[in-house]
Amino acid sequence: MKPTYISVGILETMWIWNDFLLPYLTLDLNKFSTIPITIQRMQGSYGRVDMGAIMASLVMAIIPIVVFYLSCQKYIIKGVAAGAVKG
């Protein structure tokens, strides 16, 4: 069951980490902000965009989830391999 729990944990972590709509609707954006909302706010009005700041924020936002995935990858492969064998 461990590979299954790890796979579900990775999917749930990805969903929570990248969630935009629910925090956008429920949080007081003047006090609290999530990473995706902050990155979206970096795009200024009238098409003004600071691409350097946005790319730096995206890389910093991606690093923790990639590290989590790479640390749990062996369980995913083990679960897929176990499910491929019949009998």
Image: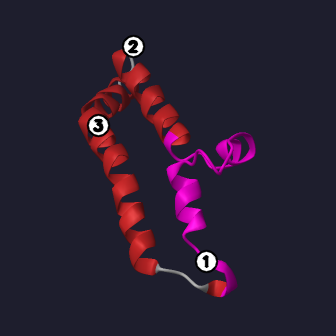
For marks 1 and 2 on the same chain, the one whose residue lies earlier in the sequence: 2
Identify the disc placed on residue 73: 3
> Which sits in the foreground, 30 or 8?
30
**In the rendering, at what x and y percent does residue 69 appear?**
33, 40
Can you identify the residue that label 1 sits on? 44
Q: Residue at x 34, y 57 (%)?
A: 60
80 w.r.t. 38: above or below: above
Name the secondary structure under disc 1. loop
Is 46 on the left-hand or right-hand side of 17? right
Q: Residue at x 58, y 74 (%)?
A: 43
Identify the disc placed on residue 77: none
Asked if residue 42 is among those painted magenta in the image, a careful observer would answer yes
The amino acid on which the numbered mark 2 sits, given as a three-letter code, is Met
For marks 3 and 2 on the same chain, the one whose residue lies earlier in the sequence: 2
> Which sits in the foreground, 87 or 33?
33
72 w.r.t. 22: above or below: above
Quick one: label 3, few (<14), some, or many (20+) residues within 10 Å?
some
Identify the disc placed on residue 1: 2
Q: Residue at x 29, y 28 (%)?
A: 75
66 w.r.t. 53: above or below: above
Q: Quadrant of the N terminus?
A: top left
